[in-house]
């Protein structure tokens, strides 16, 4: 997940509008939309701070180079890592079967 997706997800989770976020950060709602869509990728530190407080985002996400995992994704990853080899194999088989029914491919490497 990218920072824009995280902003969008948290805004929706907290039932906030683009205008709500814009007012809290001192920017127009169009700027918030551009953040969410990845059109504007560099967000000033003062705006980052306001976003973190309003959207309950850990500030470290603005400094990560890799994709950001949602809380649910992190929980699934942790559960997978803590599972025994049989449970891991079963989980991967379920994922592969699910992808087959969707008509998409998964590369397990």
Image (cartoon, rainbow, N blue to C red):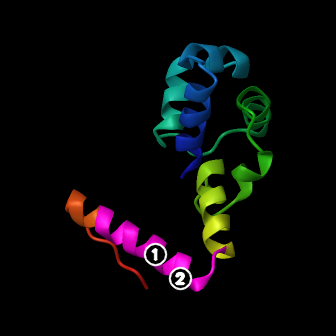
Discs 2, 1 touching: Cβ within 8 Å? yes
Label 1 neighbour load within 10 Å: few <14, some 14-19, many 20+: few
Is residue 19 placed above or below 3 in the rendered structure?
A: above
For the point 54% across and 76% down, which residue is it? 87
Frontmost residue, 72 versus 64: 72
Is residue 18 in the magenta section? no
Whole-percent x, y for residue 93 in the image = 38, 74
Whole-percent x, y for residue 18 in the image = 55, 19
Label for residue 48? Answer: none
Is residue 14 placed above or below 66 in the rendered structure?
A: above
For the point 47% across and 80% down, which residue is it? 89
**Which secondary structure class fits the magenta region best?**
helix
Q: CA distance from mark 2 to mark 1?
A: 6 Å
For the point 55% across and 35% down, which residue is it? 9
Whole-percent x, y for residue 74 in the image = 65, 58
Is residue 64 placed above or below 9 in the rendered structure?
A: below
Frontmost residue, 98 versus 19: 98
Frontmost residue, 13 versus 57: 13
Is residue 94 in the magenta section? yes
For label 2, the residue is: 86
Quadrant of residue 11 within the rendered picture:
top right
Quadrant of residue 8 within the rendered picture:
top right
Callout 1 secondary element: helix
For label 1, the residue is: 90
Whole-percent x, y for residue 33 in the image = 49, 28
Determine whether, in the image, residue 54 is placed left or right of residue 74.
right
Is residue 33 placed above or below 94 in the rendered structure?
A: above
Part of the protein shown in magenta: 83-98
For the point 77% across and 39% down, which residue is it? 45
Callout 2 secondary element: helix
> Quadrant of the image for the C terminus?
bottom left
């Amino acid at each position: 997940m990218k920072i824009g997706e995280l902003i969008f997800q948290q805004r929706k989770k907290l039932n906030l509008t683009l205008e709500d976020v814009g007012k809290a950060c001192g920017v127009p709602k169009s700027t918030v939309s551009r953040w969410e869509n990845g059109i504007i990728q560099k967000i000033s530190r003062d705006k980052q701070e306001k976003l973190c407080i309003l959207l309950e985002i850990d500030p470290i996400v603005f400094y990560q180079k890799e994709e950001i995992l949602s809380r649910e994704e992190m929980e699934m990853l942790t559960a997978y890592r803590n599972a025994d080899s049989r449970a891991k194999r079963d989980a991967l088989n379920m994922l592969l079967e699910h992808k087959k029914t969707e008509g998409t491919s998964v590369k397990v490497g």
